[in-house]
Image (spheres, rainbow, N blue to C red):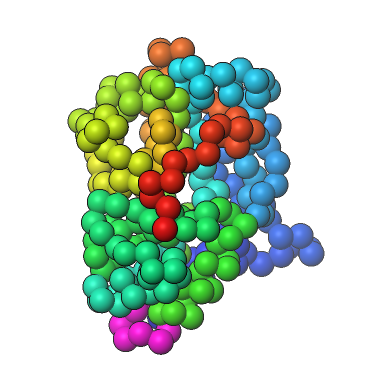
C-alpha cells in the first residue's frame, strides 16, 4: 500500500514551474532575516545574514535550525518484516528500541518495533521512498507513509543545547544517559514529539507540524537567553561530523 500522494515532491508543475517546497514557518524565518537557497526542491535557510556568528553560536553556545526539509518516511509492518526491510536497506543494521541506525546519510528510527521512521536528506527522499515501497510491496500488510509534511523538525546544537532543552522538558540528555544515536519519544513544552541525538551536542527534535511556530518560538527564546541564536545550514554543514557510534 502506498501513500505517495502525500509526498511534497509530488506537487505538479504550474505553468511549467514546480512550486518550491517550504517550511511551515517560512514567514517567521523571513521576518528573522533568513536567506534561502534551493535544496532538493525545498527553500532551505542558509543563514540569517552572518554565517560566521551562527557557526560561533553552534560551537560556543547554542544554535537552533529549522530543518523541515528533511524527509520523514514511516514504514509500518509486522515486527519481523520491519526488521528484515531495515536490515536489507542498511546492510544488516539491527533494529532496537531506543537506538537509531545511521546508514548512508539516512537515520532509521524505531518508533515501535513495527513502525520505523526513516529521516532523509531532501535530495534522497524520493529514492529512499522508492526503495522502501519496493521492499514493502513484497511483504504482507506492509506500507510506507509519507510523513515529511506531517512533522516539523529542528536541530538544536552546541555546548548549551542540553540546557536549552532542560528549560522545557524532563528527559535527561547527559551523555551518559542519552548516547549518540539514541532515539526516544519526548514531551517538550507540553508538546509530544521525538528526540534523536545525532552526535556530540547535536540533537534533532521532531514534532507535529501544526506546532512548528510554537516550538520555534520556545526554542529561539531559550537559546537567546543563553547567548545563542537561529542558524542556517551554512553553520550546520561546517560543524564537526556526527560520531560513529550510531553508524551501521
Q: Give the camera-side residue of 174 and 30.
A: 174
Q: Residue at x 48, y 80 (%)?
A: 134
Q: Residue at x 47, y 58 (%)?
A: 103
Q: Is residue 162 magenta?
A: no
Q: Name the image quarter holding residue 196.
A: top left
Q: Is residue 176 above or below residue 88?
A: above
Measured as percent of width and height from the top left, residue 46 is found at: 65, 35
In-image side of 118 versus 15 (left or right): left
Q: Quadrant of the N terminus?
A: bottom left
Task: Please tell me whether residue 45 is drawn above or below residue 134 in the rendered image.
Answer: above
Side (left or right) of 121 relative to 153: right
Does any portion of residue 94 appear in the rendered image?
A: yes
Residue 168 occupies quadrant: top left
How many marks are shown on the rendered structure? 0
Of the pair 10 and 139, the residue shown nearer to us = 139
Q: Residue furthest front?
A: 244
Q: Position of residue 185 (x, y in %)?
A: 25, 47
Residue at image point 71% right, 60% down:
18
Q: Position of residue 45 (x, y in %)?
A: 62, 36
* Magenta extent: 137-145
Q: Quadrant of the C terminus?
A: bottom left
User: In the picture shown, does residue 30 fall above or below 180?
Assistant: above
Rendered view: 92 above or below 168: below
Residue pictured at 52% horizontal, 58% vertical: 104
Residue situated in front as seen by the camera: 47 or 29: 47
Across and down, in percent, residue 156 comes to 43, 32
Can residue 150 be spotted in the picture?
no
Amino acid at each position: 500500500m502506498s501513500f505517495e500522494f502525500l509526498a511534497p515532491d509530488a506537487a505538479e508543475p504550474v505553468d511549467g514551474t514546480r512550486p518550491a517546497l517550504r517550511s511551515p514557518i517560512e514567514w517567521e524565518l523571513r521576518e528573522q532575516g533568513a536567506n534561502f537557497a534551493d535544496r532538493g526542491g525545498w527553500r532551505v535557510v542558509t543563514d540569517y545574514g552572518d554565517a560566521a556568528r551562527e557557526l560561533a553560536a553552534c560551537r560556543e553556545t547554542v544554535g537552533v535550525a529549522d530543518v523541515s526539509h528533511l524527509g520523514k518516511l514511516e514504514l509500518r509492518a509486522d515486527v519481523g518484516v520491519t526488521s528484515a526491510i531495515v536490515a536489507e536497506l542498511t546492510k544488516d543494521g539491527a533494529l532496537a528500541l531506543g537506538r537509531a541506525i545511521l546508514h548512508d546519510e539516512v537515520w532509521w528510527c524505531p518508533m515501535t518495533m513495527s513502525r520505523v521512521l526513516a529521516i532523509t536528506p531532501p535530495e534522497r527522499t524520493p529514492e529512499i521512498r522508492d526503495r522502501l515501497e519496493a521492499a514493502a510491496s513484497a511483504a504482507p500488510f506492509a506500507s510506507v507513509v509519507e510523513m515529511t509534511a506531517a512533522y516539523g523538525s529542528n536541530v538544536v546544537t552546541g555546548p548549551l543545547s542540553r540546557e536549552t532543552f532542560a528549560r522545557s522538558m524532563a528527559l535527561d540528555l547527559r551523555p551518559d544517559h542519552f548516547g549518540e544515536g539514541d532515539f526516544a519519544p519526548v514531551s517538550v513544552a507540553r508538546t509530544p514529539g521525538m528526540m534523536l541525538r545525532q552526535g556530540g551536542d547535536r540533537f534533532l527534535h521532531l514534532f507535529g507540524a501544526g506546532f512548528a511556530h510554537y516550538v520555534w518560538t520556545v526554542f529561539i527564546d531559550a537559546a537567546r537567553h543563553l547567548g545563542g541564536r537561529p542558524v542556517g545550514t551554512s553553520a550546520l554543514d561546517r560543524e564537526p561530523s556526527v560520531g560513529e557510534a550510531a553508524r551501521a
